[in-house]
């Protein structure tokens, strides 16, 4: 198990709202289990924002589309495998076009560019994050750059699959050589271990 503390949960709950641009009154669909890294701190984020929680008995593409259409969902978090099921859902399970842009936060395994492109085509706005149980869930984000909007969809999805700018609640982030603990060159090829504070 991982030992968490109140200060860390507080910082990450507020960081979640800031990084994702969540506003007061957000309607959040729980496709992410609350037992997984404390639901990435979103239970507390929603409390801070006077948000609404929508829960599902079972996470299926049909249930997600239905909640978006009938419950006014504005945000949800999901692992790439859930996004894949949404992208590849049969037409009978979908409600398209979406009634609004729906914000999706994904983390866990890096999402394949094809899944990111598919979600974009359907009208979802995906934020790609990375984290650990020890960091209260996601704490690093692929910060979107406006010039990426001009790229072809496949190239946009490729850069969208990268990481990572630290959340505002994360004090330190680096990639280091495990023997020396010295930062490795930021050249995109040198391997190292991610360290966070």
Image (cartoon, rainbow, N blue to C red):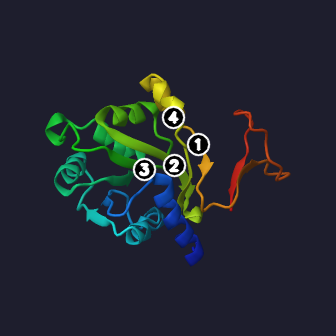
Secondary structure beneath dot 1 equals: loop
- Residue 170, picture quadrant: bottom right
Labels 2 and 3: the sequence-earlier one = 3
Q: Which mark is residue 105?
A: 3
How far separated are the C-alphas under marks 1 and 2?
A: 7 Å
Labels 1 and 2: the sequence-earlier one = 2
- Residue 43, picture quadrant: bottom left
Secondary structure beneath dot 2 equals: strand
Labels 3 and 4: the sequence-earlier one = 3
Residue 147 location (% of width, % of height): 53, 30
How far separated are the C-alphas under marks 3 and 1?
A: 13 Å
Residue 61 location (% of width, % of height): 25, 46
73 horizontally vs 18: left or right: left
The residue to which callout 4 is attached is: 146
Contact check, label 1 and label 2, Cβ < 8 Å: yes
The residue to which callout 2 is attached is: 129
134 horizontally vs 148: left or right: right
Contact check, label 2 and label 3, Cβ < 8 Å: yes
């Amino acid at each position: 198990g991982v030992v968490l503390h109140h200060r860390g949960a507080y910082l990450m709950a507020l960081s979640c709202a800031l990084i994702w641009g969540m506003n007061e009154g957000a309607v959040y669909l729980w496709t992410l289990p609350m037992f997984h890294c404390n639901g990435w701190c979103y239970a507390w984020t929603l409390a801070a924002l006077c948000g609404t929680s929508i829960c599902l008995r079972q996470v299926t593409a049909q249930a997600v589309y239905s909640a978006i259409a009938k419950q006014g969902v504005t945000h949800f978090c999901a692992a790439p495998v859930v996004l894949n099921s949404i992208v590849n859902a049969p037409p009978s399970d979908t409600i398209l076009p979406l009634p609004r842009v729906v914000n999706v936060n994904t983390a866990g395994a890096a999402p394949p560019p094809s899944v990111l492109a598919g979600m974009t085509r359907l009208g979802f706005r995906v934020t790609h994050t990375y984290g650990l149980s020890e960091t209260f869930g996601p704490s690093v984000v692929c910060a979107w750059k406006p010039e990426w909007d001009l790229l072809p969809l496949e190239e946009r999805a490729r850069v969208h699959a990268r990481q990572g700018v630290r959340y505002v609640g994360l004090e330190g982030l680096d990639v280091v050589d495990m023997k020396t603990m010295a930062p490795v060159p930021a050249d995109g090829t040198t391997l190292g271990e991610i360290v966070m504070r």
